[in-house]
Image (cartoon, rainbow, N blue to C red):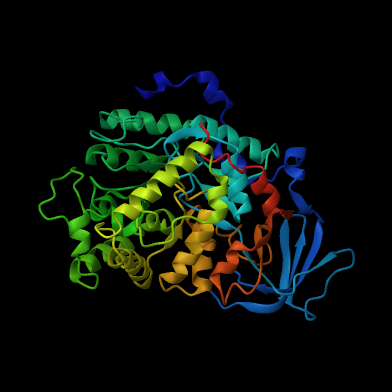
Amino acid sequence: MFTRFMPAILLALAVPAAFASQPPQMLSESVTRHIRVDARQLALTGIQVIDGSGGPAQTDQTVLIENGRILAVGADGALAIPEGFERLDMDGHTVIPGFVGLHNHLHHPGVPVSHHAAPHLYLAGGVTTLFSAGSAAPLAELNMAGAVSRGLGPGPDMRIAAPYVTGPGGNWVMPRPETPGDARAFVDYWASAGVAGFKLYRHVTPAIAAAVIEHAHTHGLAVTGHLCSLTFQEAAEMGIDRIEHGFLSMSDLVADKARGECPSTLSSLETAEMDGPEIAAIVESLVARDVTLTSTLAIIESHFAHRPQGDPRAIEMLSADARAAYDARQTALRARRDTTRFTPELFNRVLSFERGFVAAGGRLVAGPDNGRHVVPGYGDQRNLELLVEAGFPVAEAVRIMTHNGAVELGLGSDRGLVRAGYRADLVVVAGDLAADPAVIRSTVYVFRDGHGYDPESLADAARGDVGLR
């Protein structure tokens, strides 16, 4: 049984994920040092609003915030500003909902420890709610989420996943339940610890995957997967709630794939007919069974040598070891640029699959899957840019990264929209985001529960710390 490996005293320290939904009553100095706007009654005036619904941008708007909630949104001059509200002139700026990230790790892959850098940078990048989508140090992450929820440190509302579940041939540090009974005990244990969901990893066996999915659902918890041993259609038939990474993790097209085998998929993806019946059937199966896909375009881009390889702001956040690894990887990527199978055509297929899934009625959410030079927060911003490159209008890309994520986490009536009654979790950027998605990098304020944080102050506190061992 997996419980024998978990010290009870550590489990007692973990804070259930549901606690994180409650705004803290008091904020410590570790938090307030990063806050620049803290009026409990605030009017943002002259601002462009992209509200997260997918509708067009509205210019010259006023957004009223009171006690951490949006009181009203309306046209300048038409919406009366009550007496006592502090006015903040935001002419030339755009406001969107805070990002709701669905693949937002708190560890740096290859360094299985949690660190303060992740919550600082996620908040700096505009992420106000997240799901960690696989934890390397889940007890530490549960405690970190609890500390943020109590106002002891800055960060998003963080919903923590259980450890990844893999199988034979998988990552050696990940749990490998041997029987369905073990899988159910694993789920019971981590559900009692307060996790917000589970993640299946590439080599998980079908029997274990089915047991995890079925038993997680009895606890009201969702299951996602970075798949390979399971095809998308097999996972959908088992009742999986979400699938990570999209096209590049799909093994459905591999000829003669054995059940439970994790094969090489690249050849099948290179030759797939994107508008053909096989892919259409896969997409139809996912949509019919209400399976969500998580777009992780920022980390996917890092595989492609012809693509941009690192936001300068992100490189500054890397530790010395992580920077050395980045430099070595860039050298290797350049050396194989002309021979790599990760070609522009393959990248376009990745984008095409996500467009087709949404066009067929599927729900797409997003998260950066931070690692390499993709760091928390800035990776989320890059995802927005890449969704627009994929062909989504800016307003639709914003919806994917905000309200879609909130709906996926069961929070769609509370956050993810710039609308009266919703939490004042907002991102204010300098410029016209509707005209230029790169404006997302010019973040001026990130509001969480109505507190306006300074992104630069948050980033300064994490500089050089991503990937510390």
**Which image quadrant for residue 280?**
bottom left
**Which image quadrant for residue 1?**
top left
Which residue is depicted at the point 64% across and 35% down? 147
**Which image quadrant for residue 171?**
top left
Which residue is depicted at the point 23% across and 52% down? 231
Q: Is residue 55 above or below residue 213?
A: below
Is residue 195 in view?
Answer: no
Question: Residue 338: image x %, image y %?
Answer: 27, 60
Question: Residue 39: image x %, image y %?
Answer: 82, 56
Q: Is residue 231 above or below residue 214?
A: below
For this view, does 178 lie left or right of residue 320?
left
Residues 431 and 168: in front is 431
Q: Residue furthest right?
A: 83
Residues 29 and 324: in front is 324
Question: Residue 448: image x %, image y %?
Answer: 68, 53
For this view, does 87 lie left or right of residue 232?
right
Which residue is depicted at the point 57% across and 48% down? 316
For this view, does 83 lie left or right of residue 322?
right
Q: Is residue 36 above or below residue 160?
A: below
Is residue 390 in view?
Answer: yes
